[in-house]
Image (cartoon, rainbow, N blue to C red):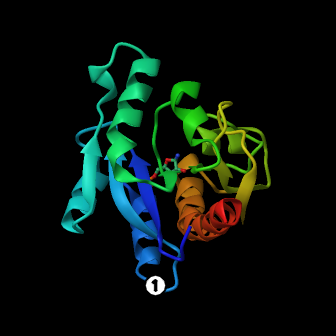
């Protein structure tokens, strides 16, 4: 692979604040990747509008148009096929992916999760961190493997949990760290992808 920037596909389901932080990072000349396209499983995801405003190609693959998770995953594969994507960034993409999609992209797909993995896989991470009496929370960017929220960790950021925290206050503090963690993780992932293909 040359020193050309890696082509990213960012997968979202909602407002896309992580997408915004990734796009911001790609403005730096020495950032190793650029956002080639944004894909959403929800036609009304706020992040799609943001992408369009920034002249980024968008694709919607609506999970409701498919009979099974496997069929949806095949729809994702088909949608990506023409785009020569180097790295997929799951950024608030709220669908469980099956091996139909994960296997062909293993080693070229990363995810952000709002907890200090391996703690609190799955949903409602902040509520669960508070209920567990944790003293710190955070976020993790990791390689995606077939088992949910389980691949090798690339970057983790920690925040202290304060006595007055609610799931919402904690989510806000963790999200700030997500926006730092994701661009850092893309740099590391890009370097690994380049090394493995050189
Ligand atoms: C983030 O907290 C992410 O970790 C979680 O969903 C949220 C998405 O936020 N999986 P945004 O759409 O990037 O603003």
Q: Left or right: where does residue 60 sit relative to residue 157?
A: left
Observer-nearest of 41 and 162: 41
Residue at left 61%, top 70%?
187
Q: Is residue 99 visible?
A: yes
Q: How many marks?
A: 1
Q: Is mark 1 within 8 Å of ligand 1?
A: no
Residue at left 80%, top 55%?
135
Instruction: Return the x and y of residue 7 as percentages of the image width and height.
Output: 44, 62
Q: Is residue 185 above or below residue 142?
A: below
Q: Where on the picture, by quarter, is residue 198?
A: bottom right
Q: Where on the picture, by quarter, is residue 102?
A: top right
Q: Quadrant of the N terminus?
A: bottom right
In terms of secondary structure, where does tag 1 sit? loop
Observer-nearest of 9 and 173: 9
Observer-nearest of 54 and 74: 74
Q: Left or right: where does residue 3 sit relative to residue 57?
A: right
Q: Dot 1 corresponds to which residue?
A: 28
Instruction: Return the x and y of residue 21 as percentages of the image width and height.
Output: 45, 69
Residue at left 37%, top 43%?
80
């Amino acid at each position: 692979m040359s020193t050309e920037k890696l082509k990213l596909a960012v997968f979202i389901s909602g407002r896309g604040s992580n997408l915004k932080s990734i796009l911001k990072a790609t403005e730096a000349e020495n950032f190793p990747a650029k956002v080639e396209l944004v894909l959403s499983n929800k036609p009304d995801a706020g992040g799609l509008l943001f992408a369009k405003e920034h002249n980024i190609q968008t694709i919607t693959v609506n999970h409701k148009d498919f009979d099974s998770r496997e069929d949806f995953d095949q729809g994702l594969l088909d949608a990506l096929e023409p785009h020569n994507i180097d790295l997929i960034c799951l950024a608030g993409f709220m669908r469980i992916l099956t091996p139909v999609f994960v296997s062909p992209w293993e080693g070229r797909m990363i995810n952000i999760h709002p907890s200090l993995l391996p703690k609190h896989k799955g949903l409602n991470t902040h509520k669960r961190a508070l209920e567990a009496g944790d003293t710190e929370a955070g976020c993790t960017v990791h390689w995606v493997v077939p088992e949910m929220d389980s691949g090798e960790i690339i970057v983790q950021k920690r925040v202290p949990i304060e006595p007055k925290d609610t799931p919402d206050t904690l989510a806000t503090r963790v999200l700030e760290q997500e926006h730092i963690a994701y661009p850092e993780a893309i740099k590391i992932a890009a370097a690994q992808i380049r090394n493995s293909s050189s």
